[in-house]
Amino acid sequence: PPKAPVYRIGFSQCSTSGPWRQAMQSGMERELSFHPEVQFRITDAHDNSQVQQEQIRELVRGGLDLLIVSPYEAGPVTPAVEEAYKQGVPVVLLDRRTTSPNYSAYVGGNNVEVGQTAARYAARLLQQHGNVVEILGTPGSSATAERHQGFVRGLVAYPGLHLVGQVTGDWKEKTLKPALTKLLQAHPEVSLVFAHNDAMGRGAREVCQQLGISGRVRVIGVDGLSGQGEGIDLVQRNVLDASVLYSPGGEEAIRTALKILNRQPYNRESTLGTLVIDSTNVLTMQQQTEKMVSQQHDIERQQSLLQRLRATYASQQTVLYGLLAT
Ligand code: FRU
């Protein structure tokens, strides 16, 4: 039979650490397990745009049929992505964007909508009155700019809500703590914190506890991952009042990549849906993700069974050919 074409896909990941990025990569692996014709390479920029540019250039130099990128900071990573694109390498932007229109497809959540959803939910929690604080992700990440834009735009509809301060975290739990402590001391009347991800929401909750104001401060995060200490669990334990679901989209990125490579029609913007996870639906969400995890285990068991069968078949074939040869 004709051999399936071999595709080389490179994925420039801003960072491979943290459960959300890990979930993204597992999603990719899951989808890639159906495509043995794909050679997949992933690089880890350790949240450094300079490193990410170099890694993108190196991936392209090594020979690439398609590039997937999740840029750490939009501006600084753009030149390398543009170079790749202009050399004819299709580019799939995943979760975060560059500042350039030179890409083939974007896969990810609508981050403006994430911010707007948070604003709407904040208004509901506070009955449209109160002071709020925002904790931003890395300033140069497109997700930060878009979540902020959406949040501010969303607040416009509620004149009783006031954004009294901002803190920049770097998507991590700890960095924001000193600045948030100071801010909440200066504004003791704050009743809600919107953190651009759940990790920073967790950090914000700890700050509130240390200040003894946790009982009257609501915290909203983003991501809604399953797993211990992650969004769904945090909502269930009332560490977060809500988390806006933001899917990592690993499977979808690979699917889009393959459509591009196989010259099939694809969406230039593949927007993954979002929803608010709060006390009303957290149990359902948890049960659903648990079910998915167990189904994933079943798939893996079936795959290893298949592999064993294939190995047995191959060795039996060897025996058979041996017999025929004699
Ligand atoms: C992980 C992360 C997520 C966040 C996303 C935004 O690196 O910080 O928590 O939703 O990136 O791009």
Image (spheres, rainbow, N blue to C red):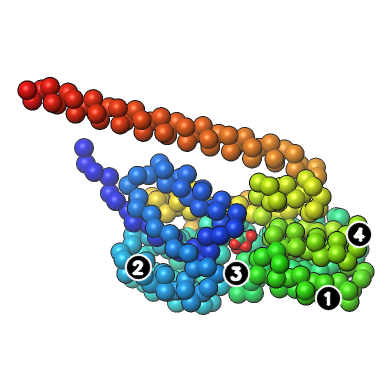
Residue 307 occupies which quadrant of the picture? Answer: top left
Q: Nearer the viewer, mark 1 or mark 2?
A: 1
Cα distance, mark 2 to mark 4? 52 Å
Circle 3 SS class? helix
Label 1 vs 2, first from the N-terminus: 2
Circle 2 SS class? helix
Cα distance, mark 4 to mark 1? 17 Å
Q: Residue 142, labelled with which disc? A: 3
Q: Residues within 10 Å of mark 2 (few under 14, many from 20)?
A: many
Q: Residue 60, labelled with which disc? A: 2
Q: Nearer the viewer, mark 2 or mark 3?
A: 2
Asked whether residue 120 is in view, the answer is: no
Label 2 vs 4, first from the N-terminus: 2
Question: On screen, 325 above or below 62?
Answer: above
Mark 3 CB within 8 Å of ligand 1: yes
Cα distance, mark 3 to mark 1? 27 Å
Asked whether residue 34 is in view, the answer is: yes
Q: Is there CB contact under 8 Å for labels 1 and 2?
A: no
Residue 249 locus on image (x, y percent): 55, 52
Residue 178 occupies which quadrant of the picture? Answer: bottom right
**Badge 4 amino acid:** Arg
Q: Which residue is mark 1?
A: 182
Residue at 88% of width from left, 59% of height from top?
A: 214
**Badge 2 amino acid:** Val
Cα distance, mark 1 to mark 2? 46 Å
Q: Nearer the viewer, mark 4 or mark 3?
A: 4
Label 3 vs 1, first from the N-terminus: 3
Question: On screen, 216 above or below 61?
Answer: above
Q: Residues within 10 Å of mark 4 (few under 14, many from 20)?
A: few
